[in-house]
Amino acid sequence: MKQMFSALSGKIKENAIDVYMDSIEPAVRDPVFFSVGMPNGGMIPKKELQRIMNEIFEADPARLYEYCSAKGFGPYVDVISKTENIPESYIMATNGNTQGVDLVCRMLLDEGDGFAMEMYTYSIAFSAVHQYRLKAVGIPLEQDGLDVDFLEKTLQTRRLKALYIIPNAQNPTGVTTSLEKRKKLIELAYQYDFIIIEDDPYRDLLFHGRPPSLFELDPLKERTIYLYSFSKVMAPAMRTGFILAHPAFLKKLEQFKQVTDACTSPMNQMLAGKLISSENWTQILAKQKHFYEKRKDWTKRFLQHMHETEQWEGAEPAGGLFYWIDVKKGGVTEWMKKAAQDGAVFVPGDAFTLERGRNTKIRLCFAYCSDEEMKKGFSRLEESFKKWKKTST
């Protein structure tokens, strides 16, 4: 059958996280999944979503059952315009940020283009690298974000078409880019003529305020394209978000959107638009941030214990869903399989980088599991690590 596949099919690769998760075989009935990068089920605003959906169906608007434009459902775009303080000509609805990244890459990139990203990042960036045969460079991350000096030196010797960045509570590291570095990135984008693809799904889960986006800092809106998704604060199943971009970019993005899926579900756009317009939305976000900050603190205490006994290290995230931990011992992919057998599942660091070698880092999602599962999972991680360390020395 392979002879029937297109050349493009040969460039598409399976997500590394999926490959790893398919390879594990838990030997217990109740595995704890620190690997799942989704919000906690108790934090999904189910009652509000149900109430609003019932109101929508009871009103029975004809538009509920129709397509909308590729740009988006009018009332939804209007709400985003108000909440983001940007004209409607800069807005397009998406089916979440995975689609947003794909559409932007299709608009911007040609085979062989230079492409920069954080050294460790969300795997959608790797899909673009493989699909377009990009000349990719990973930029090291520091505690306050991307190493802008390293990026500037790179720009002095090679042409980059785009930079992909997750500026807030970055996946997988939890790093949030400082305001100073955000301003520097905008300066570099204009100086060296490249586009910043700003993927920002965790902005509303920063625990204590958030800095302005790169898009907000871009004076002409000509070097930054902004992506947001409601998946982490409403429900992953809604697959609803938006792109903010200069109208010249947006017109072309609408054309790609039209031939991809015609439009994002008007029903989901109605639901999202009404929820963020409701008087309860601020309270919903505050509840989520409080919950996830408590989970972060639990994980921090576990890390402190493991630092004292096993020298583990990790920088405390300012928000989001993830804790990035260096266990100071190589080959964590081997440990992953043994830990999964013992009932604690995590994602090894090499799932988030193009760099190859014996990786010492792991990503733990502190959001998804129940309270009881977290306690049980931490205990299993510790026991499994100590067993693995003895047998692999």
Image: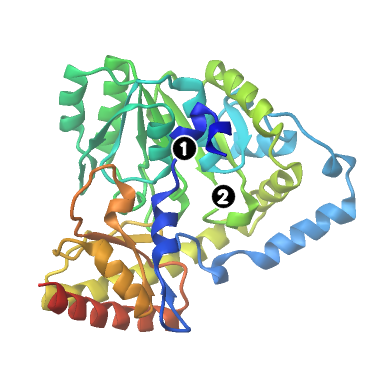
Kindly tell me whether residue 89 is visible in this rendering: yes
The x and y percentages for residue 236 are 58, 55
Q: Mark 2 falls on what kind of element?
A: loop
Q: CA distance from mark 2 to mark 1?
A: 26 Å
Quarter holding residue 129:
top left
The x and y percentages for residue 276 are 63, 50
The residue type indicated by label 2 comes to: Phe
Quadrant where the image shows the C terminus: bottom left
Q: Residues within 10 Å of mark 1 (few under 14, many from 20)?
A: some
**Compared with residue 223, is residue 355 higher up or lower down, i.e. above or below?**
below
Q: Nearer the viewer, mark 2 or mark 1?
A: 1
Quarter holding residue 205:
bottom left
Query: Which residue appears at 45% of the width and 59% of the height?
Result: 37
- Which residue is label 2 attached to? 230
- The number of numbered discs placed on residues in the rendered structure image is 2
Label number found at residue 177: none
